[in-house]
Amino acid sequence: MASRVKEDEVDITAMRAQGPGGQNVNKVSTAVHLRFDIHASSLPAMVKERLLALPGRRVTKDGILLLKEQSARSQEQNRALALARLEEIVAEATQVPEIRRPTKPTYGSRQRRLEGKALRSQVKATRRKVNE
């Protein structure tokens, strides 16, 4: 897979990871904070629009995509994981969503639905008390 994001468009800073880990977590800056400016990137305009429209808090109001990676124990692995995640997000944004065309149910499917409803009604009717 060819890289869609240029290395110089990504700003990566190291920081201390959160959570359990003992002395290693307290002393070593292994977590990685990735910042990707969508507006300043060399991506096509349609991809930029889709990235800016991502749900959640990943993209700031200024159009900067933020990713934090701290799952690995080394900074190099976290850096590689963060870049891979960014590539994955950009790859998803490059795919054009398929337009849904609404369809009507077929005659046969409507008939089967009505037959099923009638059968269910008959089953429930047989459970009732018999009036004599």
Image: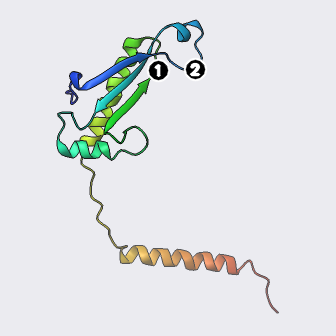
Residue at left offset 20%, top offset 25%: 6
Can the viewer see residue 66? Answer: yes
* Quadrant location, the N terminus: top left
Looking at this view, is 123 or 8 the one in front? Answer: 8
Looking at the image, residue 27 lies above or below residue 34? above
Q: Are marks 2 and 1 in contact (CB under 8 Å)?
A: yes
- The quarter holding residue 65 reads top left
Within-10-Å neighbours for mark 1: few <14, some 14–19, many 20+: many
Specify whether 131 is left or right of 20.
right
Task: Give the left or right position of residue 121, taking residue 58 as reference.
Answer: right
Task: Kindly identify the residue that appears in the image at 48 percent across and 74 percent down.
Answer: 113
| Residue 95 seen in render | no
Q: Residue furthest front?
A: 62
- Disc number for residue 70: 1
Q: Earlier in the sequence, mark 2 or mark 1?
A: 2
- What amino acid type is highlighted by mark number 2? Gly
Amino acid of disc 1: Gln
Image quarter of residue 57? top left
Please give the name of the residue rendered at 39% of the width and 29% of the height, measured from the top-left corner.
67
Residue 46: x, y in percent? 20, 46
- The spot of residue 119 in percent (x, y) is 58, 77
Residue to which mark 2 is pinned:
19
Quarter of the figure that contains the C terminus? bottom right
* CA gap, disc 2 and disc 1: 10 Å
Q: Is residue 123 above or below residue 83?
A: below
Residue at image position (18%, 44%) is: 45
Image quadrant where residue 7 sits: top left
Circle 2 residues within 10 Å: few <14, some 14–19, many ≥20: few
Q: Mark 2 falls on what kind of element?
A: loop
Camera-side residue of 14 and 122:
14
